[in-house]
Image (tube, rainbow, N blue to C red):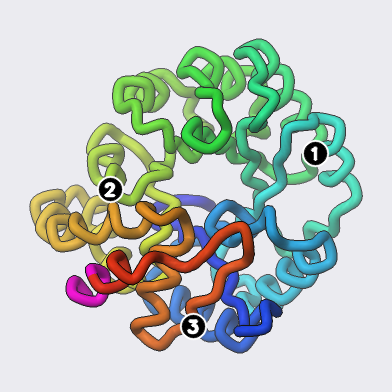
Amino acid sequence: MFSGLGTALLTPFCENGDIDYDALSRIIECQIAGGADFLCILATTAETPTLTLREKAELRSFITRQVRGRLPIVAGCGGNSTRAVCEELSATDWKDIDAILSVVPYYNKPSQEGLFQHFTTIGKASPLPVMLYNVPSRTGVNMTADTTLRIARECENVIAIKEASGDMEQIRRIIEQCPEHFKVFSGDDALALDIMRMGGEGVISVIANGMIREFAKMIHLAQEGQFEDATSINSRFAPLYPLMFCDGNPAGIKALMSQKGMLGNTLRLPLVTATQQTQQKIQELI
């Protein structure tokens, strides 16, 4: 169900801070027409920590109605309280959602044993398949290859990981030793090709929000083993990758999409727009 290019869908806002559903509708249609293989919603790039429970429910409903089954959807459902995540899994209407993305617990920095127990508990409680999300730069703790492999072998309902540790040896080991049902996705646009060369399944991408056709072509070439052509495209993206994150995510991608007329350049506090210097560099590149 999940392979190739997943777009970490952002949340566009109006100038008054409300969700801009007209822009979101256009973005979703661009994703489908441009070659996205699945959507990842209500995760980091969507500014989910700034959304209310009501807004998250409305977004799930709006996105699934707009997609109408044309793409698989994985939706964020994670936190640093195992009980609270399990309660959310039980209380939420997951109609037309195909899997959940659950992040490594942040702030309280559990041990590797704590991570194992957290995710196996979630895997058993979830009515949908579970994709893990390891992003130590945000959570404060890295889930090791040993722990990821242990979870994958213990819980068949845990089907994949979005790996954003940047540790290529760790990622290589997971790819080489994971069970057949378990897939590895890059959580870093800049590392997507390297991870796919090692046998990774694809990428969950930020930059695909605003450059879907070009980025989808690159990922699909890699899936076909045409890495020389894919690398040529990647070299053109390379100067843009750091600009997407130097002022925080999704400040960079929203600046890029605003310059292309796709949405308003509005974020919710405590996130703010990219600096003028960053925006100028993005404009020059695109």
The residue that mark 3 highlights is: 263
Report the span colored magenta. Answer: 281-286
Q: Quadrant of residue 18?
A: bottom right
Q: With respect to residue 250, does 212 lie above or below?
A: below
Magenta: predominant secondary structure element?
helix
The residue that mark 2 highlights is: 190
The residue that mark 1 highlights is: 85
Q: In front: mark 1 or mark 3?
A: 3
In this rendering, position of residue 177 left or right of residue 113:
left
In this rendering, position of residue 46 left or right of residue 163:
right
Location of residue 107 in the rendering, given as x and y in whole percent from the top left corner: 66, 30
Disc 1/disc 3 C-alpha distance (Å): 32 Å
Q: Amino acid at mark 3?
A: Leu
Q: Visible in this render: residue 284?
A: yes
Disc 1/disc 2 C-alpha distance (Å): 30 Å
Label 1 Cα neighbours within 10 Å, binned few <14 / some 14-19 / many ≥20: many
Q: With respect to residue 116, does 25 lie above or below?
A: below
Q: Nearer the viewer, residue 195 or 282?
A: 282
Location of residue 204 in the rendering, given as x and y in whole percent from the top left corner: 44, 52
Question: Which element carries disc 1, helix, strand or loop?
Answer: helix
Q: Nearer the viewer, residue 286 or 182?
A: 286
Label 2 Cα neighbours within 10 Å, binned few <14 / some 14-19 / many ≥20: many
Label 3 Cα neighbours within 10 Å, binned few <14 / some 14-19 / many ≥20: many
284 is within the stretch colored magenta: yes
In this rendering, position of residue 190 left or right of residue 87:
left
Question: Which element carries disc 3, helix, strand or loop?
Answer: loop
Q: Which mark is residue 232?
A: none
Location of residue 45 in the rendering, given as x and y in whole percent from the top left corner: 53, 58
Name the residue: 61% across, 57% down: 270
In this rendering, position of residue 275 left or right of residue 221:
right
